[in-house]
Image (cartoon, rainbow, N blue to C red):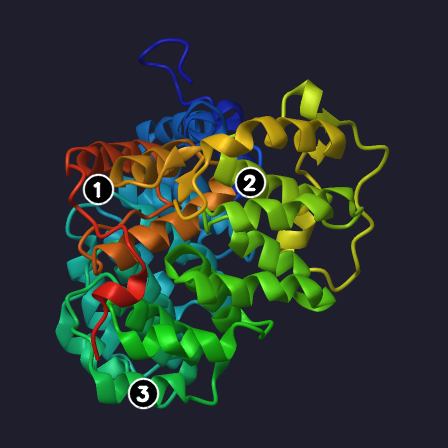
Amino acid sequence: MWDRPDEQLRWDVLETHFEEACFLWTQWEGNLSSPRYTLTDVAGGNELRLRAHLRALVLGGPRVAERLLIPALGDEDPEKLRVASYTLLAMDGYTDLVARTFKEAPDEQRGAMARALSLSERPGLSKQLLPLLAVDDPDLQATLLDVLSFRRGLPPEPLLRLSQHEVPRVQAAALRAACTASLPEDPRLLRKLLGSPSAAVRAAGLHWGLVRNSREAFLACLDWSDTRDEAGDLARLAMSMGGEPAHLTRVLRLLDVSTLRREALWALGFSGKVAAVEACLPWLRDPKHASVAAEAFCAITGLVLTERFRKERDEELDLEEDGSVEEALDAHLELPRPEAIETWWAEARPRFGKDARYLSGRPFTTEALVESLSGAATRRRAPLALELAIRTQGRHALEVLDFSHLQTHRLTELRSLGSRALWTGPFLTQMSH
């Protein structure tokens, strides 16, 4: 950046740092929900390079702030907004400016800034942002709730009020935040939320109820297991990872529903059960669902799709125009060789107990769950983190979209909890109300 300490800043180099940071941030976000990257891959790849460019901008000091970063706060480009906001927060003296810009920005630009605010390591930032919750702007309140929830910076008092807000977006955001704050489950409020006309509120209420170990919330999963929405996705996951045999059977039956087959296979991959493994086998030969079926199979059995078990794609999957983001990501999964996998399973099957549960071939334990959170493909980590939260009633959480060094530190803490840190049986056996 400098040829000699007394020379001027190299603006061409600094502008390159800014442009590279913008590009790498977007790449990093994709890596965090990828079928091909693990947390270790993320840490040593785009995230490492991103943080190096961000540090270089911070070292440029006030002149870089004035010439590059503050002007970018007025830009509509989300990449520039994220980098400028994060870097300014890492410098001294610009927190008020970023907070004020965040408050006054249009909703689209505010959303880009929110990611930078969530990730910022600026001391005292949560406390400084908290008063903005009192501003009568539902879009601001909803976005800020997500930011403060990510930062673990929310006291229970505003959540109790905002969880009953008249605007569904605010209400849903408050409920998401309640899953990681010390807001106790309220059976009457939960019942109202589960009956909300808003799909977002129902899903957030279901999430909150499950984390608070509500029996009523889990039983609501039975009603929503065949819906194609966020609540349905959550219901299928909960029934698969924490259900009793009858609940798993209901998810298995969804394989007969063409519009829910992909979603059922995804959920079954978190069940850990032999019945799910064997249900995946026929779908290894289906052009549309072979990859996600193989992914689920491997997540339970621990099989790695080495060259013997996979084949090259002739072309990408022919996705429907209205296909989901998850279906698009499926196109980047390995394409299995059904015959080789079936032969392997015939030999491996005796090692798996019919009623046991497995994660990557290991019996389900606290240690196995933490190791899966560490080593699984990043797109599989959010459901695993959800299970951790449910099984510990929200006491132990992992934010899977955080910087990897913070996640690694948290995983180290979780490894020290011991085998009795969480309940490993069906959810209903520990749920009340």
Q: Which of disc 2 and disc 3 is earlier in sequence?
A: 2
- From the image, which quarter does the N terminus lie in? top left
Residue found farthest to the top: 4
Q: Amino acid at mark 2?
A: Ser
Q: Is residue 285 left or right of residue 24?
A: right
- From the image, which quarter does the C terminus lie in? bottom left
Within-10-Å neighbours for mark 1: few <14, some 14–19, many 20+:
few
Quarter of the figure with residue 176: bottom left
Residue hosting label 3: 191
Q: Tag on residue 196? A: none
Q: Which of disc 2 and disc 1 is earlier in sequence?
A: 2
Name the foreground residue: 400 vs 97. 400
Name the foreground residue: 387 vs 378. 387
Q: Nearer the viewer's eye, disc 1 or disc 3?
A: 3
Residue shown at 21% from the left, 60% from the top: 393
Q: Position of residue 151 (x, y in %)?
A: 25, 54
Q: Tag on residue 92? A: 1
Q: Are the residues tagged 1 and 3 within 8 Å (C-beta)?
A: no
Gap in angstroms between the C-alphas marked 3 and 2: 35 Å
Within-10-Å neighbours for mark 2: few <14, some 14–19, many 20+:
many
Residue 221 to residue 263: above or below:
below
Residue hosting label 2: 34
Q: Secondary structure at mark 3?
A: helix
Residue 119 to residue 111: above or below:
above
Q: Which of disc 3 and disc 1 is earlier in sequence?
A: 1
Q: Position of residue 162 (x, y in %)?
A: 26, 81
Q: Position of residue 5 (x, y in %)?
A: 31, 12
